Image (spheres, rainbow, N blue to C red):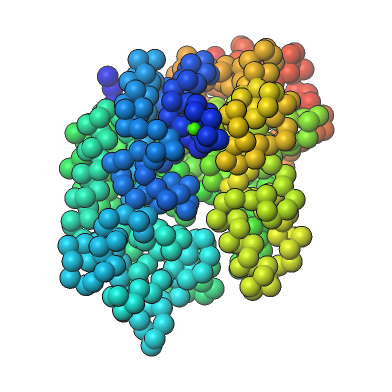
């Protein structure tokens, strides 16, 4: 098998907690995922990526790992995992694990030892610093609020945590830490998993001397300052040489703040580090003009800015690296709500339009659970409807403590941007608890589950599900969709997203109307040899109806 299968694959992301509960405790689990493999297969996905399923106190829903070689009992046992893996393989699909090694949980054995003294076996596994003038060693802020440093009296020192205090950062400068990480990777690869999604992997090498963040220190400016540190390439190369290159795997590094130039260094054809990265430019558009508010905003994304963000990556990585294509995941609001229109009048059309726009690009597409149903944001209006520590902490810090924004405004920002929008349970049917569980789920369902659910889309030939199924099949069947080069068209047009792809003597034209108006655009549609896919039943050529999207082949 070619090691390039990552370029021909479509990935389906499963958030285990919210996918399918098999034992009716209200929490999704591994046997639940196994029950739904045929559904994922039917969509056409080649690879399943599981968010973390390891033992964890779940302060950050599994991104705080207490034991990398044990399954969280809420999700089942190691035997359940082995069964899920072999059934996934039997059905011809692959499985990616989430590797979270920028930090561990504070409940991990390494940290429990490390915090006791300066001279134990794990003393140097984390980033410890003496106080400076009686306070924190620098001005870094943590992603989930407060300082990035927490003081431990037993050591008389602070430890660094770029995320919550329960997520201490590992010290990658220590060669033993790197060997411990490689050992974890080998454990899962030897079981037969097919690769890793690597959590915030561009944060593992910290800037030498840990200097202050210049200007205003916020969570956002801290991460940008720390990202892509001096030894990142070296660490990733070592990981590749010692571990990854010995297996047939796919790797994707989550890299907030990375530029295309950075990504080429890690995913470049000769770099031998990772296959691709998750970049953040399009999901962080319309940040608050007040830098202290970081990503919190309720502004719609402006189409020309979206095009700048996505087109830049298409052009820059072509022939030099490889893109990952995603609209949303467990950290982002629902695609149709954030980038288009989730009003019931337009939702289905708009969800298909977004799918077309992304799936015809060069790269590996990722579909987040429920995206194929056209699931929407939760549209919460009260603080107590939120569960995620990022949302809840941000509200308290920005509204109650710092008075930077008033409560009602912050609630609008949360409704637009909160990660909880993506974490409501999967909507399987219109019965009680949406077929997710027989009991009240760990997190409330989106109230629209009676209209939007898997049972309904599977019965409807015109559903978002079957449209995504067709997009995926088109990619599998057409080399031009997988490999063609990208030509940007009219980047300043604020109504239509259009581009071409070129491959041999073939050209593909993609035209998407991002508005609720009927408009016209002439890209010589009349000369096309074939309409490959469109989200209306007929084709009116240069006329584009509300949220209409079409793909033409010329040859
Ligand atoms: C990544 C994860 C996110 C998590 C964070 C800290 O961004 O996707 O869910 O909170 O890293 O691990
Ligand atoms: Ca369960």
Nearer to me, 247 or 459: 459
Q: Residue 382 in the image: x percent, y percent? A: 73, 53
Residue at image point 25% right, 33% down: 189
Whether residue 81 sits left or right of residue 383 in the image: it is left
Whether residue 378 sits left or right of residue 127 in the image: it is right
Q: Is residue 391 above or below residue 70?
A: below
From where the camera sits, is residue 171 visible? no
Residue occupying the far bottom of the picture: 133
Q: Is residue 124 above or below residue 481?
A: below
Work out which quarter of the rendered image holds the N terminus and state it. top left
Work out which quarter of the rendered image holds the C terminus and state it. top right
Q: Is residue 154 above or below residue 188?
A: below
Residue at image point 22% right, 31% down: 190
Total labels drawn: 0
Residue at image point 17% right, 70% down: 119
Nearer to me, 529 or 327: 327
Image-quadrant location for residue 246: top left
Q: Residue 120 in the image: x percent, y percent? A: 18, 66
Q: Residue 281 in the image: x percent, y percent? A: 54, 49
Q: Residue 174 in the image: x percent, y percent? A: 21, 61
From where the camera sits, is residue 425 visible? yes
Residue at image point 18% right, 57% down: 175
Q: Is residue 23 above or below residue 235?
A: above
Whether residue 330 sits left or right of residue 63 in the image: it is right
């Amino acid at each position: 098998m070619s090691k390039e299968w990552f370029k021909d694959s479509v990935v389906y992301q499963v958030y285990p907690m919210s996918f399918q509960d098999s034992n009716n405790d209200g929490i999704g689990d591994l046997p639940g995922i196994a029950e739904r493999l045929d559904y994922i297969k039917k969509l056409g996905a080649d690879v399943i990526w599981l968010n973390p399923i390891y033992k964890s106190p779940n302060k950050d829903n599994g991104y705080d790992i207490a034991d990398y070689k044990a399954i969280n009992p809420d999700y089942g046992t190691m035997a359940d995992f082995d069964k899920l893996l072999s059934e996934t393989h039997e059905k011809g699909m692959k499985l990616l694990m989430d590797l979270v090694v920028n930090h561990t949980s504070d409940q991990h054995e390494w940290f429990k030892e490390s915090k006791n003294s300066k001279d134990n076996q794990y003393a140097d596994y984390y980033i410890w610093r003496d106080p400076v003038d009686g306070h924190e060693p620098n001005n870094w802020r943590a992603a989930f609020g407060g300082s990035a440093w927490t003081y431990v009296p037993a050591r008389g020192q602070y430890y660094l945590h770029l995320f919550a205090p329960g997520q201490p950062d590992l010290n990658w400068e220590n060669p033993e830490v790197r060997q411990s990480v490689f050992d974890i990777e080998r454990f899962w690869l030897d079981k037969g998993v097919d690769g890793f999604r690597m959590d915030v992997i561009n944060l593992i090498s910290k800037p030498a001397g840990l200097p202050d963040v210049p200007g205003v220190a916020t969570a956002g400016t801290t991460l940008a300052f720390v990202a892509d540190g001096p030894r990142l390439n070296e660490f990733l190369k070592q990981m590749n040489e010692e571990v990854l290159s010995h297996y047939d795997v796919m790797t994707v590094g989550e890299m907030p703040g990375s530029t295309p130039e950075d990504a080429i260094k890690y995913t470049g054809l000769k770099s031998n580090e990772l296959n691709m990265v998750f970049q953040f430019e399009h999901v962080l558009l319309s940040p608050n003009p007040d830098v202290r508010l970081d990503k919190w905003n309720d502004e719609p994304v402006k189409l020309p800015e979206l095009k700048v963000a996505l087109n830049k990556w298409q052009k820059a990585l072509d022939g030099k690296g490889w893109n990952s294509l995603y609209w949303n995941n467990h950290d982002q609001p629902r695609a149709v709500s954030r980038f288009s229109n989730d009003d019931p009048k337009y939702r289905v059309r708009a969800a298909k339009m977004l799918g077309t726009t992304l799936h015809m690009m060069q790269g590996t597409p990722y579909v987040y659970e429920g995206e194929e149903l056209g699931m929407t944001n939760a549209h919460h209006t009260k603080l107590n409807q939120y569960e995620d520590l990022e949302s809840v902490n941000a509200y308290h810090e920005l509204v109650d403590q710092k008075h930077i924004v008033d409560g009602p405004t912050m609630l609008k920002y949360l409704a637009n941007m909160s990660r909880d929008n993506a974490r409501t349970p999967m909507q399987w049917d219109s019965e009680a608890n949406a077929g997710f569980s027989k009991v009240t789920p760990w997190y409330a369902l989106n109230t629209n589950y009676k209209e939007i659910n898997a049972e309904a889309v599977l019965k409807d030939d015109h559903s978002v599900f079957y449209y995504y199924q067709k997009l995926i099949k088109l990619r599998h069947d057409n080399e031009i969709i997988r490999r063609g080069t990208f030509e940007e068209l009219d980047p300043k047009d604020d109504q239509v997203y259009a581009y071409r792809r070129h491959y041999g003597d073939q050209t593909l034209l993609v035209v998407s109307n991002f508005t609720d108006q009927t408009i016209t655009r002439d890209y010589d549609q009349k000369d096309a040899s074939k309409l490959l896919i469109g989200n209306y039943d007929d084709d009116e050529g240069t006329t584009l109806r509300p949220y209409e999207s079409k793909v033409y082949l010329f040859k």
